[in-house]
Structures are given as C-alpha cells and as structure tokens.
Image (spheres, rainbow, N blue to C red):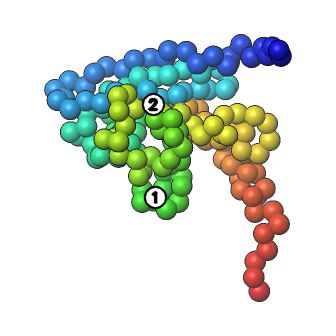
Amino acid sequence: MAQFTLPKNSKVTEGKTWAYPSGAHDVREYKIYRWNPDDGKNPRMDTYYVDCGDCGPMVLDALIWIKNNIDPTLTFRRSCREGVCGSCSMNIDATNTLACTKAMADVKGAVKIYPLPHLLGGEGPGARSHQLLCPARLDRAVAADHLADAAEGVEAEP
C-alpha cells in the first residue's frame, strides 16, 4: 500500500472562537475555513455566532453580517445576490453551492463553510483563488492573469 506524507501545513486546526452576540435570541454557529498562505501557518476553522434576527435568511447574508459586525478581515466574493453570476460559490454543508441561494434553514447544526475544493492552492493562474475565505487581500494581478487565460482563444464575432 502506498504511503503519502502530507505537507506540515495541510492539517486544518481549530481557530479563533468569536464572542457570542449579546442580547441575541436566534443565534446560529458558523465554522469558516481560514488560511493565509503568506504566514506559513496551518489552515484553521474560525467559529462565529450570527444573530439571525439581525440579518437575512441566506448564508451570504450571514457572511456579510460577520464581516460587518464581527471580523472585517473575512474576505469572500459576491456580486448579483440572485444566483446568476456564481461569484459566491463555496462549499457549504459539504455541498458546492451558492451562498446567495443557500438558506440558513436548510443547514442542520453548525454552518460549515469551505472554499470550493478545486480552489485550494496550487501553482499557476488562479492559484490564489483559495483566499476566498481568507484574511489575505485579493491578488488582482493573479485574478487578471486567470481572466486572461480564460479568455484566451475566445474570438469576438464580427
């Protein structure tokens, strides 16, 4: 049987647990994958508590609430909020889906959020797209390279 040795920073660790919102009656637990490839530390799962009475019903609403009220370093993509563009694609409750169309009520227990599996690092264009839920800033140069690669070979109609 083949044996593989994983890189030392491949194990996901328990991250920070943020404070429970005071005065909230309808609270939901969110566990969000965070990783900064520049600091050399392992990926972690941070725990947040969302006041569902103070935000909309979708997972994207909760992520926006977390960013605005708890942790401004949380980074994710969003655009149309109507399930059309796909910007808010992520792995929610072990399913690749859109955060804007996934209702919190559809998830049993803690809401666990990870980047899409094919965006977790690597080399080449788009390699840093895994920063979807990371404290690191968006690398616009890499995003532009990824867009250029995707557009390669596409010809405009006359």
Question: Which amino acid type is shown beneath numbered disc 1?
Answer: Gly
Q: Quadrant of residue 63?
A: top left
The residue that mark 1 highlights is 83
Q: Of 39 and 93, which appears nearest the observer? A: 93
85 vs 133: above or below: below
Q: Of 104 and 25, which appears nearest the observer? A: 104
Taking the image as shown, residue 25 lies to the left or right of residue 115, namely left
Q: Which mark is residue 112?
A: 2
State how far apart marks 2 and 1 are (Cα): 20 Å
User: Which label's residue is closer to the chain start, 2 or 1?
Assistant: 1
Q: Could you say whether the residue bearing mark 1 is in a helix, strand or loop?
A: loop
Mark 1, Cα crowd under 10 Å, few <14 / some 14-19 / many 20+, is: some
Q: Position of residue 43 (x, y in %)?
A: 59, 21
147 vs 126: above or below: below
Q: Quadrant of the N terminus?
A: top right
Q: Is residue 32 visible?
A: yes
Q: Position of residue 151 (x, y in %)?
A: 75, 63
Residue closest to the far front: 1
Q: Quadrant of the C terminus?
A: bottom right
Residue closest to the far bottom: 158
Q: Quadrant of residue 119?
A: top right
Question: Which amino acid type is shown beneath numbered disc 2?
Answer: Lys
Taking the image as shown, residue 83 lies to the left or right of residue 9, namely left
Q: Position of residue 88 (x, y in %)?
A: 50, 48
